[in-house]
Amino acid sequence: MLLANHPLLGKTIAGDKTSRLTIRAAEDVARFSLRIAPASAQSAGAAFGTPLPTRIGGMVENGGRTALQLGPDEWVLLAPVAEAVLWPVASIVLLAPQLRAPNPDANRPL
C-alpha cells in the first residue's frame, strides 16, 4: 500500500546508462529473527531446511527459504508465508535442550 506511492518508484539513477534501478514491493514472506550460539548454527540450519551462512553478511538460498547472517550469533530467516506456523514449533524443538529446567538437587550438599 505505502510502496504504491513511493517517491522512487520507477525512477532511474541519473547518469547511469548501464543499469536500471527498479523499486517494487517484495513478496510476502515469513520473517524470523534467530539468535543462537554459533555452535548451534548447523543444527538450526538443519531444522530450518537451509544451511545457515557462516560469515557475517553471508546469505544462503535454498528451496524458497533464505538465511542471512547479521552478526556472530544472529540470523534472519525468510520462508514462504504458508510455512510461518511451523517455525515457532521448530524453534521450541530446536531450543528444548537449552530450555530444560535446572536440576535443583544437582548443587545440594550431601
Image: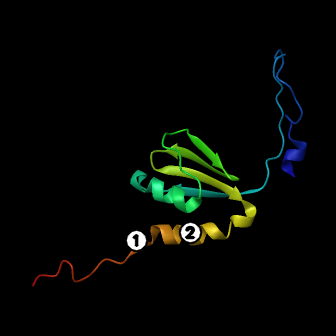
Q: Residue 97 carries which label?
A: 1
Asked if residue 97 is positioned above or below residue 10 in the image, the reply reads below
Q: Which residue lies furthest to the left in this view?
A: 110
Q: What element carries label 1?
A: helix
Q: Do the residues labelled 1 and 2 touch (CB within 8 Å)?
A: no
* Residue at figure coordinates x 56%, y 39% from the top left: 58
For the residue carrying disc 1, how many other residues have a C-alpha within 10 Å: few (<14), some (14-19), or many (20+)? few
Residue 86 percent location from the top left of the image: 64, 69
Asked if residue 61 is positioned above or below residue 105 in the image, the reply reads above
Q: What element carries label 2?
A: helix
Image quadrant in which the C terminus is located: bottom left
Q: 2 or 36: which is nearer to us?
A: 36
Q: Distance between the residues labelled 1 and 2?
A: 13 Å
For the residue carrying disc 2, how many other residues have a C-alpha within 10 Å: few (<14), some (14-19), or many (20+)? some
Left or right relative to 104: residue 43: right
Q: Residue 69 carries which label?
A: none
Residue 108 percent location from the top left of the image: 16, 82
Residue 1 percent location from the top left of the image: 87, 52
Q: Looking at the image, is mark 1 or mark 2 earlier in the sequence?
A: 2
Specify the quadrant of the image occupied by residue 102: bottom left
Specify the quadrant of the image occupied by residue 21: top right
* Residue at figure coordinates x 50%, y 59% from the top left: 44
* Residue at figure coordinates x 53%, y 67% from the top left: 91
Left or right relative to 36: residue 19: right
Check disc 2 and give the amino acid type.
Answer: Ala
Left or right relative to 103: residue 18: right
Check disc 1 and give the amino acid type.
Answer: Pro
* Residue at figure coordinates x 43%, y 57% from the top left: 40
Residue identifier under label 2 = 90
Residue 49 percent location from the top left of the image: 59, 58
Asked if residue 66 is positioned above or below residue 46 in the image, the reply reads above
